[in-house]
Image: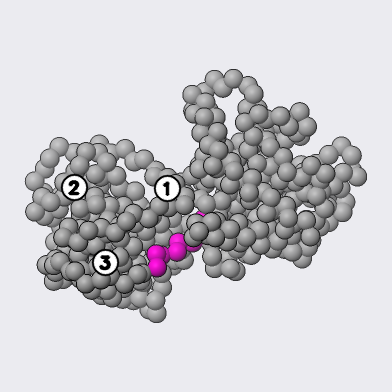
Amino acid sequence: MFDHLAKLAHVPGGRWTLAGAAGLCLVAAALSHGAAAAGPSVTKVRFGGTQAETRIVIELDRATVGRLETGPDADQRIILTLADLQVAGDLQGSGQGLVKAWMMDQAGGAARLRLDLVGPASIKRRFLLPPSEGSTAYRYVVDIVANASVPAFAPVVSAKPVTVTPVSVTLPAPVLSTPAPAVRAEPVVVQKATSTPRPYVAPLRLKKVIVIDAGHGGHDPGAKGSETNEKDINLAAALSLKERLDRSGRYKVILTRDTDVFIPLENRVQVARHANADLFISLHSDSGANSQTRGASVYTLSDKGSDRAARNALEKNNWFYDVNLPAQDKAVKQILLDLTQRATKNRSATFAQLLLARIDEHVQLLARSHRDAGFVVLLAPDVPAVLLEMGFITNVDDEALLAERESRQDFMDSVGDSIDAYFDEELRIASR
Ligand SMILES: [Zn+2]
């Protein structure tokens, strides 16, 4: 990573200005979750630079030939295909500099990269770099420059605040380095102004990122039913929900765990933050002293933690975070500040209502089915989050419903329906 950072600072011609540390805020949306080592030939897409000049680096496991599908002077979108490459599903993200959003997918035998631009730009150069300096990756590099003679179109306000993972970089002392040799130099296109009216190009619709968190795992079994452990029920449900969401093709689904392993609570929150998730849903199974008690319930974050007395079972597992206690840790205090972000809480509450409405047709609900609570896993600011208690595994009927594949899939399909409804609603509001 640092090798690449250093390299990006040394672009021929010295045009690669570092406008303060922010100029090199190199955050790649490299969410190649689940990519198998033997599978995809495109491993990562990275960005560097500013709104004047932006570099896109595509990491590959082999050489390729690039072809521009759009003209050299791009207005709103650049489309580049790279021959004979396999793409792992769902490479996408918000960009940097001149790139507003990007998506890479399979187009026939080629990998297709689409870049949505913040304003008119021209391809300055593109070339393939062979592996070097301990790296086994080929890199296809594209440099684009802003076309200043045409006014940029109005910035599009994103419905979701974009979280940028800060990367701290220690810049090396200035060194006159020779650039790595380009094995395939392609023609440099001279930018030219255009005054013809620009046709509207619908913005790339990135897949919504959903993080599904199967509660407990490994040495933490969670609640115990007569025949099942909560951790296993939760994982099975998470996989069922993922299957439903994958089927729709609308989502990029990330699981905090997909096997029986222990994942610390903070890590679960971090997964959601790093993935720039649009929605976080934590799946749990309830337990109670009274075996008659049954029903599902949904929690969203509260800054009061008023329900904690009723949540003793969870408190023992430390899943419950007592937000009334004075926080000793500065990081925790920061989180407490963040969690007051009303917008996120409102969106969580909106989703909770949609969720309850949909699952109501499939499972019983507790009398007070929507609650506020201070669960640690709900603490990621900017990510709407709910915790779904799917039912009581201490009740035989609820346990059977959750343990049987078919009824569990029905249940999770309805959770999927509520996720569809939530994003349909968001789209409707955004397009008003
Ligand atoms: Zn639990």
Percent of width and height locating residue 5 = 25, 47
Residue displayed at 71% across by 29% down: 306
Q: Residue at x 34, y 67 (%)?
A: 114
Looking at the rendering, the stretch of residues picked out in magenta corresponds to 202-209
- Residue for badge 3: 75
> Helix, strand or loop at disc 2?
loop
Query: Is 268 placed left or right of 395 in the picture?
Result: left
Earlier sequence position, callout 1 versus callout 2: 2
Q: CA distance from mark 1 to mark 2?
A: 25 Å
Check disc 2 and report the residue beneath it: 9
Residue at left offset 36%, top offset 40%: 166
**Visible residue check, residue 367:** yes
Q: Position of residue 30 (x, y in %)?
A: 39, 55
Residue in view at x 28 percent, y 52 percent:
97
Front-lying residue, 137 or 249: 249
Q: Which residue type does callout 1 highlight?
A: Val
Residue 28 shown left or right of residue 127 in the figure: right
Q: Identify which residue, 130 or 325, lies in the foreground.
A: 325
